[in-house]
């Protein structure tokens, strides 16, 4: 049978616990809200880290041409076949034959964002952008040809 002393000790411990909880609640209640209004203020308040992997894009040279030489290393290193390269063989003015990029197909919906393709590229022709807004209603819109300017676009939110 509990004594009065144990009863009042339990009652005091309960009150102390209640006061601690109420103090924490009041401290949080007085803090300024940190809600960010999205998408209205995404250009001013949204911070995307530099290392964020959003979507793949082709890097172009100073003439606006893709730096890709269609070697196929990115395609071979992709673990799930997200990248498909189409290339033509052309003859240079010197009489040598070389590959020329025709189409760079990229399936954003099945990409693992593992960056194996970027690391395998010997010419730095592909990179991940900071673009994170990739939501669409049709899955076919996630299959891109990065040689087309509208598919190689990037918003880079900084």
Image (cartoon, rainbow, N blue to C red):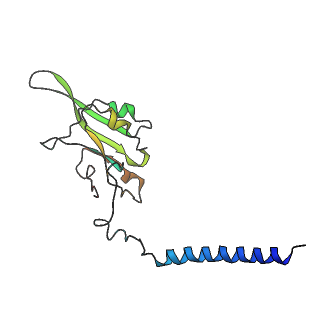
Q: Nearer the viewer, residue 33 or 74?
A: 33
User: 121 or 145, which is in the foreground?
Assistant: 121
User: Is 30 situated left or right of 43 in this image?
Assistant: right
Residue at horizontal 36%, vertical 39%? 83
Q: Vertically, is 111 above or below 1?
A: above
- Residue sitting at x 62%, y 77%: 19
Residue 24 placement: quadrant: bottom right
Image quarter in which the N terminus is found: bottom right
- The spot of residue 56 in percent (x, y) is 32, 45
Q: Is residue 116 above or below residue 137?
A: above
Q: Position of residue 108 (x, y in %)?
A: 38, 48
Q: Residue at x 76, y 74 (%)?
A: 9
Where residue 33 sits, quadrant-wise, is bottom left
Q: Identify the residue at the far left of this view.
A: 93
| Residue closest to the far front | 5
Task: Give coordinates of residue 106: x percent, y percent.
Answer: 35, 43
Residues 30 and 7: in front is 7
| Residue 91 screen position, x and y as percent | 15, 25
Q: Quadrant of residue 72?
A: top left
Q: In screen coordinates, is 9 left or right of 37? A: right
Horizontal arrangement in the rendering, residue 71 relative to residue 29 (left or right)? left
Looking at the rendered image, the quarter that the C terminus falls into is bottom left
**83 left or right, relative to 154:** right
In the rendered image of this protein, does residue 22 appear above or below residue 155?
Answer: below
Q: Looking at this view, name the residue that lies furthest to the top.
A: 95
Q: Residue at x 38, y 36 (%)?
A: 116
Q: How many marks?
A: 0
């Amino acid at each position: 049978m509990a004594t009065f002393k144990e009863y009042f000790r339990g009652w005091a411990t309960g009150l102390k616990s209640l006061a601690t909880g109420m103090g924490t609640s009041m401290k949080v209640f007085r803090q300024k809200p940190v809600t960010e209004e999205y998408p209205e203020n995404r250009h001013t308040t949204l911070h995307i880290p530099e290392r964020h992997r959003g979507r793949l894009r082709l890097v172009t040279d100073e003439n606006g041409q893709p730096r890709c030489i269609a070697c196929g290393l990115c395609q071979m290193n992709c673990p799930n076949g997200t990248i498909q390269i189409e290339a033509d063989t052309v003859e240079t003015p010197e009489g040598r034959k070389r590959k020329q990029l025709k189409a760079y197909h990229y399936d954003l919906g099945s990409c693992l964002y593992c960056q194996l393709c970027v690391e395998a590229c010997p010419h730095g022709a592909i990179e991940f952008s900071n673009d994170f807004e990739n939501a669409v209603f049709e899955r076919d819109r996630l299959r891109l040809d990065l040689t087309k300017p509208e598919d190689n676009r990037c918003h880079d939110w900084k």
